[in-house]
Image: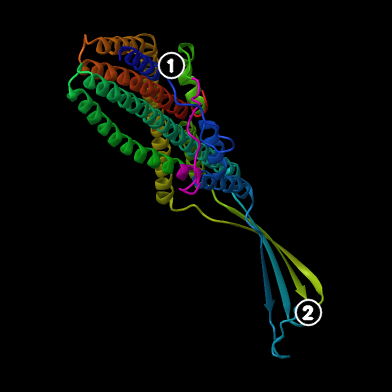
């Protein structure tokens, strides 16, 4: 009987020291890496596509802002009955005289440049908004992938532990048959298995929900099958986590901050444009007059509006100045929040790196040794079944801590890249 127990103990120790699920061949099915999901989302995601089209539309408004208003033409038929000598006529050569008026409006000097600058900054804001939407979508995919990886690996770990408990039940049954252990040991092993099967049901439901959320971001049908996540992105080393250097990158690339800066510049151009309201808009015109078949007179016209009601214009100027100050304050608030979020994220990433290193170097090896010792002790009758279960729980918690630290590291990396506006 004893050799049989030794073989079982060695099998259990080998089972628990495995660190990953068996590799699967994903083929062309996306999901094994987060990059494969991002490639699909960049093409399929409708939210990002909508923002790209809005940015393109905003860019077209720049040319419109720089254009002059369309010229105007007016035709005046004067004395269409030729003082009653004929019936009414609408032909220019058959009336007393015909006046043709061509006019063109010219905004005050510099107004068109300011309108173009304002539209250009608005287009930049739309472009950064599109980039911000993509960064947000990519971050949600990265976070979803990290959660999916955690759930998948936890599911595999539970399956491993369930297999262990099945083997432990067999060993307990053998020992009970030999009169070396109470029947309670086998019953406890069965109870643990039931609890684990219940956990697996909940995990499978959560896994499916996470997959559905990811497929929503990818604009794929909910029934689409994704490959199991296998490859995690490499986490940054400590030298890459200098907060000051990261803050400089974030100030240059963060879409939200860039959008606030563009809106502030547009508001500044709008404030200067409001000041141009103090000056008139000019209208130039030329008007030749036709008598029968000849043009005998030519008139030149200059027309302008009179900016008389200054109270209205001062209110417009105060409004534009308030909008400029609001945009500036919003940009400063974004910069302050960006700095705080960056420090928090880097701290969390350091913690995830240290936790994973500690689990790999100390906690997991110690738990494996504890389990092996408990198995040998149970085989020889020196420890009871509760000690084996406790050792099993310790190694399960250690592996769970490692999986959690890995997923946390991926999530923190995604949050850091969202703040940077680009991949690290």
* Residue ID at (41%, 22%): 406
Label placed on residue 243: 1
Label placed on residue 66: none
- Is residue 356 found left or right of 93 in the rendered image? left
Q: How is the image coloured?
A: rainbow
- Is residue 320 found left or right of 121 in the rendered image? left
In the picture, which quadrant includes the N terminus? top left
Mark 2 vs mark 1, CA separation in Å: 82 Å
The answer to which of 402 and 175 lies nearer the viewer is 175
Q: Which residues are magenta?
A: 215-234
* Residue ID at (69%, 87%): 88
Q: Main secondary structure of the magenta part?
A: loop
Asked whether residue 150 appears in the rendered view, the answer is yes
**Callout in the foreground (2, 1):** 1
* Residue ID at (19%, 18%): 179
- Rendered location of residue 84, percent (x, y): 69, 90
Mark 1 surroundings: few (<14), some (14-19) or many (≥20) residues within 10 A:
some
**Quarter of image, res 392:** top left
Q: Is residue 309 above or below residue 253?
A: below
Mark 2 surroundings: few (<14), some (14-19) or many (≥20) residues within 10 A:
some
- Is residue 273 found left or right of 109 in the rendered image? left
Mark 2, residue position: 93
Assess whether residue 335 is covered by the magenta stretch: no
The answer to which of 106 and 231 lies nearer the viewer is 231
Asked whether residue 109 appears in the rendered view, the answer is no
- Rendered location of residue 340, percent (x, y): 36, 23
Q: Is residue 44 above or below residue 384?
A: below
- Is residue 319 found left or right of 85 in the rendered image? left
């Amino acid at each position: 009987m004893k050799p049989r127990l030794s073989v079982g103990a060695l099998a259990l120790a080998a089972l628990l020291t495995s660190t990953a699920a068996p590799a699967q061949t994903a083929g062309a099915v996306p999901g094994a890496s987060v990059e494969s999901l991002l490639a699909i989302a960049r093409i399929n995601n409708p939210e990002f596509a909508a923002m790209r089209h809005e940015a393109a539309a905003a860019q077209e408004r720049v040319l419109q802002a720089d254009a002059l208003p369309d010229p105007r033409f007016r035709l005046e038929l004067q004395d269409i009955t030729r003082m009653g000598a004929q019936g009414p006529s609408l032909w220019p050569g058959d009336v007393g005289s015909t006046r043709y008026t061509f006019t063109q409006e010219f905004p005050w000097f510099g107004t068109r440049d300011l309108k173009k600058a304002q539209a250009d900054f608005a287009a930049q804001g739309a472009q950064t908004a599109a980039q911000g939407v993509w960064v947000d979508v990519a971050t949600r995919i990265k976070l979803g992938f990290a959660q999916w990886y955690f759930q998948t690996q936890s599911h595999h770990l539970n399956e491993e532990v369930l297999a262990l408990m099945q083997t432990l039940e067999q060993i307990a049954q053998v020992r009970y048959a030999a009169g070396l252990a109470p029947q309670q040991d086998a019953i406890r092993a069965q109870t643990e298995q039931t609890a684990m099967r219940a956990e697996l049901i909940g995990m499978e439901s959560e896994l499916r929900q996470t997959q559905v959320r990811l497929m929503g971001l990818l604009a794929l049908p909910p029934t689409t099958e994704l490959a199991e996540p296998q490859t995690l992105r490499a986490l940054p080393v400590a030298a890459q986590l200098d907060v000051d250097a990261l803050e400089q990158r974030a100030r240059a690339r963060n879409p939200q901050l860039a959008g606030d800066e563009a809106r502030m510049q547009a508001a500044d151009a709008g404030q200067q444009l409001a000041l141009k309201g103090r000056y008139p808009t000019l209208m130039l015109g030329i008007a030749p007059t036709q008598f029968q078949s000849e043009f005998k007179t030519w008139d030149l016209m200059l027309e302008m509006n009179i900016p008389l009601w200054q109270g209205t214009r001062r209110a417009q100027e105060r409004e534009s100045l308030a909008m400029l100050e609001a945009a500036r304050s919003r940009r400063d608030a974004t910069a302050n929040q960006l700095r705080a979020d960056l420090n928090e994220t880097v701290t969390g990433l350091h913690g995830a790196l240290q936790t994973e290193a500690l689990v790999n170097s100390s906690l997991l090896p110690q738990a494996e040794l504890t389990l092996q010792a408990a198995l040998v002790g149970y085989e020889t009758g020196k420890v009871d079944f509760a000690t084996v279960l406790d050792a099993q729980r310790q190694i399960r918690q250690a592996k769970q801590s490692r999986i959690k630290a890995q997923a946390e590291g991926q999530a923190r990396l995604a949050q850091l890249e969202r703040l940077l506006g680009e991949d690290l």
